[in-house]
Image: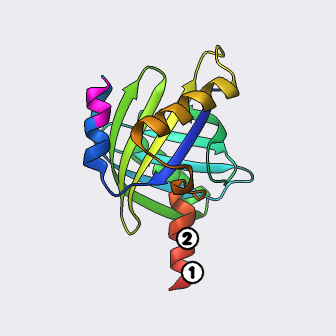
Amino acid sequence: MPLNVEIKARCKDLEHLHGILMKSGADFKGTDHQEDRYYAAAEGRLKLRQGPIENSLIHYHRPESKGTKTSEVSLYHPADPKGLQAVLDQALALRVVVAKERRIYYHGNIKFHLDRVQDLGSFVEIEAIDRGGSRTREDLEVQCLAWMKRLGIKPEEGIAQSYSDMLLENSEVK
């Protein structure tokens, strides 16, 4: 099971971060128009992500805290995401749908997302990923914090909540 350490922050200028990433030699994978469907799960979070670039069923555990967060992630890449969606929609309660435009970049084992999330705004996510068991949580955290500094993200700009929780909170306020 891959280990991730990640940070999420609001971002006023995605183009500025795009420029920094490109100058650093990051590999731009493209822009994905994603829909994440969050389902009620006995524990952790379960979402089906669908887009032209990424299609995955994702189950994960992650604390909701500012700063870096450690996640244990299980991924499944379905051959037929729409068929899987139909089954999940019948079997599980749908909690919320997150629609976003996501620019995806890689720099070594670091994955970057520059996101425009419908009804929420613009964000940056930095994920330091260990797929092979060669890095510790501390190693990944050091990488994540170094990229925060390089991108000019201040610790107080970090946000604790997931997009799904922010949307659910907004719908309760209305």
* Residue that lies at the very extreme toward the bottom in this rendered image: 174
- The residue lying toward the viewer, choosing from 148 and 2, is 148
Where residue 121 sits: x, y (%)?
37, 63
Task: Report the number of numbered marks.
Answer: 2
Say if 96 sits above or below 123 in the image.
Answer: below
Residue numbers of the magenta segment? 20-24
Specify whether residue 135 is painted magenta.
Answer: no
Q: Quadrant of residue 11?
A: bottom left
Where residue 75 sits: x, y (%)?
56, 33
Q: Is residue 86 left or right of residue 4?
A: left
Say if 21 sits above or below 83 in the image.
Answer: above
Q: CA distance from mark 1 to mark 2?
A: 6 Å
Quarter of the image with the N terminus is top right
- The residue lying toward the viewer, choosing from 148 and 42, is 148
Image point (55%, 83%), residue name: 173
Q: Quadrant of residue 116?
A: bottom left
Asked if the residue under mark 2 is in contact with the one under mark 1, i.e. CB atoms within 8 Å, the reply is: yes
Q: SS of the residue at dot 2?
A: helix
Residue highlighted by disc 1: 172
Query: At label 2, which amino acid type do we have?
Result: Leu
Q: Is residue 61 left or right of residue 150?
A: right
Where residue 158 sits: x, y (%)?
54, 53
Q: Is residue 22 left or right of residue 43?
A: left
Q: SS of the residue at dot 1?
A: helix
Category of crowding for the residue at label 2, using alpha-carbon neighbours closer than 10 angstroms: few (below 14), some (14–19), many (at least 20): some
Q: Residue 106 got which mark?
A: none
Residue highlighted by disc 2: 168
Main SS of the magenta segment? Answer: helix
Image point (42%, 42%), residue name: 81
Query: At label 1, which amino acid type do we have?
Result: Glu
Image point (56%, 56%), residue name: 156
